[in-house]
Image: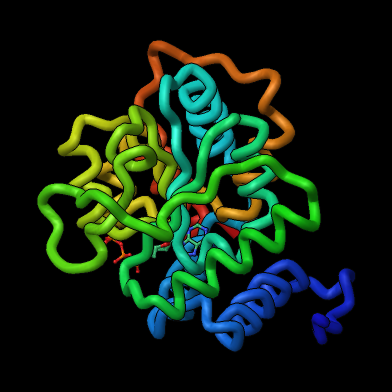
Amino acid sequence: MSDFAADPSHPRYQSLLLRHRLEQAEKDGLLAGSAMIAHGRGEAYDYLLGERTIPSAHKATVQALGTLKKAKRPVISLNGNAVALAGESLLMLAERLSCPVEINIFYRTPERMAALIGRLEAIKEEHQLEVQILGAEPNARIPGLKGPRANCTKEGIIDSDVIMVPLEDGDRCEALVAMGKTVIVIDLNPLSRSAKMGSITIVDELTRVVQNMLVDIENCVVDEAFSNDEVLADALQHIATKFTSR
Ligand code: ATP
């Protein structure tokens, strides 16, 4: 039972709600110790972006959706923060895209994996969703990565052609790109290594991105002239303009 009591009219309601989701997820054993730090870094950039979807991020979102829809074997990779913040809407999106999700976490322990799978299974049950959840029994490794964070599944991440990685770290993003995949990154920080490395980078807050995707899913066309460099440059320009205007 949620004890979240903030008033929706509060100017920081959305931010408080997301923090609450993470606090709860932390109590439920879904998160690694660094989860709040990663979220805080995202919040700082979101503040600079005006806490809204800027037009270039929406363009990248539509491009990402079109690319996922055209993919032969799309997959959505999920970490603890993604499940805690947007587990429901991500599973709804996966169902609409008819693609599996794969839990792929940096700090992998049996307890965290069980907690994350339990959360996703509960969401599936509650909303009667048909989505394959991969990651519980890894049978492959992402080449070029050391340790348990390289563990993944052949039928999910390894065989995918397009992979969406919300809130990914740079190393893993780089390793996935090196495998020849089209990597869709969701990251509020346009300067992160993941953002710069991704094939399509959505510089926007995860929960907003997934909501936008659910709205745009029937009307997304891949733009052959799409430039990820332009998307990143526009986000930085947007931040710079915010500093110089009142
Ligand atoms: P990199 O290795 O790519 O340079 P990093 O070391 O900053 O990145 P992490 O700390 O693992 O990587 O990742 C957190 C990233 O996720 C940050 O760049 C942060 O901006 C972003 N982030 C955090 N919360 C959200 C959110 N809710 N929506 C979108 N992005 C987020």
Total residue callouts: 0
Identify the residue shown where x is 30% and y is 56%.
192
Residue 237 visible within the image? no
Q: Quadrant of the N terminus?
A: bottom right
Q: Nearer the viewer, residue 25 or 61?
A: 25
Q: Is residue 57 above or below residue 194?
A: above
Residue 97, given in percent of the width and then of the height, sits at: 60, 30
Q: The C terminus is located in which quarter? A: bottom right
Give the quadrant of residue 168.
bottom left
Q: Residue at x 40, y 85 (%)?
A: 33
- For the point 42% across and 60% down, which residue is it? 136
The one nearer the camera, 26 or 208, is 26
Q: Which image quarter has ligand 1?
A: bottom left
Residue 196 x/y as whole percent: 27, 45
Residue placed furthest toward the top: 224
130 vs 169, left or right, is right
Name the one closer to the observer, 74 or 220: 74
Left or right for 152, reference 33 = left
Residue 167, image x, y percentages? 43, 57
Is the residue 1 above or below the residue 114 in the image?
below
Give the left or right position of residue 179, taking residue 16 as reference. left
Residue at x 25%, y 56% (from the top left corner): 170
